[in-house]
Image (cartoon, rainbow, N blue to C red):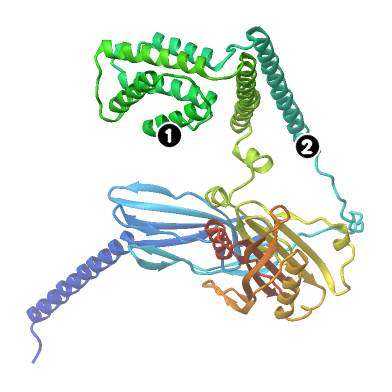
């Protein structure tokens, strides 16, 4: 039986429709995949796969994301064995609701060979995406030894640092300040001498001094202004001072009753002929003064006038009754007054010039701080505190060969001692030492690197022992040693010794307790040593040590 033509036609139409439906499904699926991949995708590229030693090539990473996505690009000083010279700011290109983030890095390598830039992790909303890996060839710099004449390597020439004369300026400033201080001292002394000559002796006797002081008290008009307590306080002080000078009893330190009893005893012993009525009136004024000062009593105006007159009469009567010659009175008082005045004038001659010099020195320091900066003051005049070192900007650098990279508050200084550099052992190719501070400072660092010609000589334990002996040569005593293996979270391994020691302060002649930490690493044919010391009780110095240790990196040696 032959198939019907209509059957073939219907079957063909169904096949066509089925094929179109599948095509549309596939197109929709591809479109969906494309949309998803565009919403979050990573691409990477390099501008060159071959460079010369030390030349820079650029790595570019592009992230296509939405505006709400959170993207974290790779960060670090090394990508594999390739060094990151510069990490450029992120650039962005907007397209509707999409965003293309572009991150560039400048990379290099200082040894020839073939290196692999590994796949780097880019986080998008805490999900990890990987970049492509690239093979980078680092070529040697070709030197034409035929056309260009070659010479032997020249020896290291020690270059003297430019002469700095800041210390000379400091000496001149100190001399100037000393001259200003002496000039002020001389001027004040000369003026005081002139005044002393003009005044001669202001009071010939204690009674004249007391009467003059009572006149000064009346001119103040204290009780008329309502300051009755202050008036009676000064009135009785004048009387007590007079009694203490002429009768020689501790009038200023006695209560009113004690003073009156001591006065009666002295009157009887010294045969001072003063009436009992005068003494009784004086006692009444002292009692009134106590009531005013402690019971807040307020006498009437005529009572205050009577008390003043009573004190005047008492002082004059007592002075006349004392059995002594006028010459004795003048000599005693004149000598005492002279001594007091000389003490006061001496203090003025010393205090005023020192204050003046202090003000000028403060102005100079402020001027230097504004014009030269605080670093200049700390480096040359004030010095660095561990707190300021901890808070200031740090310096990251690599030192020696094989290089060790660390961050420190201040750049380390190279030791250029020719005796060390010119007397190296036969198996040592080169050695370098860098330092900051000394063993007596709040904080100090010593960093050494040694490169051997063939292989590392001796174990790291022996190196630690030599470093401990070096601490002893610096003056360390009573060294407590705790030695063991060292490994940090970054995988850096070596040997460590830490503990405490004491060192004698040459100024105070007392022992200072210090904390130390010694780290030793071995890399290829080289050894790196780091000695950190700080005062045991200095918390800021301990934090500095911790930050330095956390910053340690070893530059990898490519064989």
Foreground residue among 13 and 422:
422
| Residue at x-position 89% and y-position 66% | 423
Asked whether residue 108 is in view, the answer is: no
Tell whether 147 sits left or right of 378: right
Q: Position of residue 200 (x, y in %)?
A: 65, 10
Foreground residue among 193 and 161:
193
Quadrant in which the C terminus is drawn: bottom right
Mark 1 Cα-neighbour bin, 10 Å: few <14, some 14–19, many ≥20:
few
Q: Position of residue 163 (x, y in %)?
A: 81, 38
* Up/down of 291 relative to 125, above or below: above
Q: Quadrant of residue 459?
A: bottom right
| Lower position in the chain sequence, tag 1 or tag 2 | 2
Q: Quadrant of residue 511?
A: bottom right
* Up/down of 176 relative to 425, above or below: above
SS class, disc 1: loop
Q: How far apart are marks 1 and 2 (CA)?
A: 66 Å
Q: Nearer the viewer, mark 1 or mark 2?
A: 1
| Residue at x-position 63% and y-position 79% | 483
Query: Which residue position holds label 1?
Result: 254
Q: Position of residue 234 (x, y in %)?
A: 40, 21
Q: Position of residue 35 (x, y in %)?
A: 28, 61
Quadrant in which the N terminus is drawn: bottom left
Asked whether residue 144 is in view, the answer is: yes
Tell whether 39 sits left or right of 502: left
| Residue at x-position 48% and y-position 49% | 89
Please identify the residue farthest to the bottom as the structure is shown: 1
Query: Which residue position holds label 2?
Result: 164
Count of numbered badges drawn on the protein: 2
Q: In which quarter of the image is residue 299?
A: top left
Tell whether 432 sits left or right of 117: right
* Up/down of 454 relative to 282, above or below: below
């Amino acid at each position: 039986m032959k198939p019907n033509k209509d059957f073939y036609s219907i079957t063909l139409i169904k096949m066509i429709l089925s094929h179109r439906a599948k095509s549309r499904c596939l197109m929709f699926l591809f479109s969906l995949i494309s949309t998803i991949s565009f919403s979050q995708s990573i691409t990477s590229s390099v501008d060159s796969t071959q460079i010369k030693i030390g030349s820079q090539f650029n790595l570019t990473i592009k992230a296509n994301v939405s505006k709400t996505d959170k993207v974290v690009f790779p960060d670090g000083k090394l990508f594999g064995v390739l060094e990151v010279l510069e990490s450029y700011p992120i650039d962005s290109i907007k397209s509707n609701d999409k965003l293309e983030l572009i991150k560039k890095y400048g990379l290099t390598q200082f040894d020839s060979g073939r290196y692999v830039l590994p796949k780097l992790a880019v986080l998008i909303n805490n999900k990890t995406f990987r970049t492509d890996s690239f093979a980078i060839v680092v070529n040697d710099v070709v030197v034409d030894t035929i056309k260009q004449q070659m010479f032997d390597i020249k020896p290291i020439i020690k270059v003297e640092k430019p002469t700095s004369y800041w210390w000379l300026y400091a000496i001149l400033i100190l001399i100037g300040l000393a001259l200003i201080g002496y000039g002020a001292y001389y001027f004040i002394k000369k003026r005081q001498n002139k005044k002393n000559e003009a005044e001669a002796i202001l009071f010939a006797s204690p009674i004249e001094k007391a009467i003059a002081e009572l006149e000064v008290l009346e001119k103040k008009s204290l009780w008329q202004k309502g300051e009755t307590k202050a008036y009676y306080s000064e009135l009785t002080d004048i009387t007590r001072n007079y009694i203490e000078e002429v009768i020689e009893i501790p009038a200023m330190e006695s209560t009113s009753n004690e003073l009156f009893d001591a006065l009666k005893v002295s009157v009887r012993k010294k045969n001072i002929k003063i009436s009992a009525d005068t003494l009784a009136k004086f006692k009444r004024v002292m009692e009134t003064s106590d009531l005013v000062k402690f019971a807040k009593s307020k006498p009437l105006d005529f009572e205050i006038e009577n008390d003043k007159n009573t004190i005047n009469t008492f002082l004059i009567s007592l002075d006349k009754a004392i059995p002594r010659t006028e010459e004795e009175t003048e000599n005693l008082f004149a000598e005492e007054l002279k001594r007091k005045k000389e003490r006061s004038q001496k203090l003025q001659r010393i205090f005023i010039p020192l204050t003046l010099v202090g003000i000028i020195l403060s102005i100079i320091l402020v001027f230097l701080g504004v014009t030269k900066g605080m670093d200049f003051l700390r480096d040359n005049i004030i010095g660095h505190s561990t707190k300021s070192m901890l808070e200031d900007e740090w310096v990251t650098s690599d030192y020696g060969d094989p290089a060790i990279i660390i961050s420190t508050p201040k750049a380390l200084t190279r030791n250029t001692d020719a005796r060390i550099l010119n007397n190296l052992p036969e198996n040592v190719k080169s050695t370098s030492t860098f330092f900051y501070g000394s063993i007596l400072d709040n904080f100090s660092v010593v960093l050494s690197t040694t490169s051997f010609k063939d292989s590392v000589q001796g174990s790291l334990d022996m190196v630690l022992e030599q470093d401990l002996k070096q601490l002893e040569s610096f003056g360390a005593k009573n060294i407590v040693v705790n030695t063991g293996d060292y490994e940090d979270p970054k995988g850096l391994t070596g040997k460590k010794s830490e503990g405490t020691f004491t060192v004698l302060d040459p100024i105070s002649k007392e022992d200072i307790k210090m904390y130390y930490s010694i780290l030793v690493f071995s890399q290829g044919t080289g050894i790196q040593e780091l000695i950190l010391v700080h005062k045991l009780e200095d918390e800021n110095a301990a934090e500095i040590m911790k930050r330095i240790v956390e910053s340690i990196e070893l530059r990898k040696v490519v064989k």
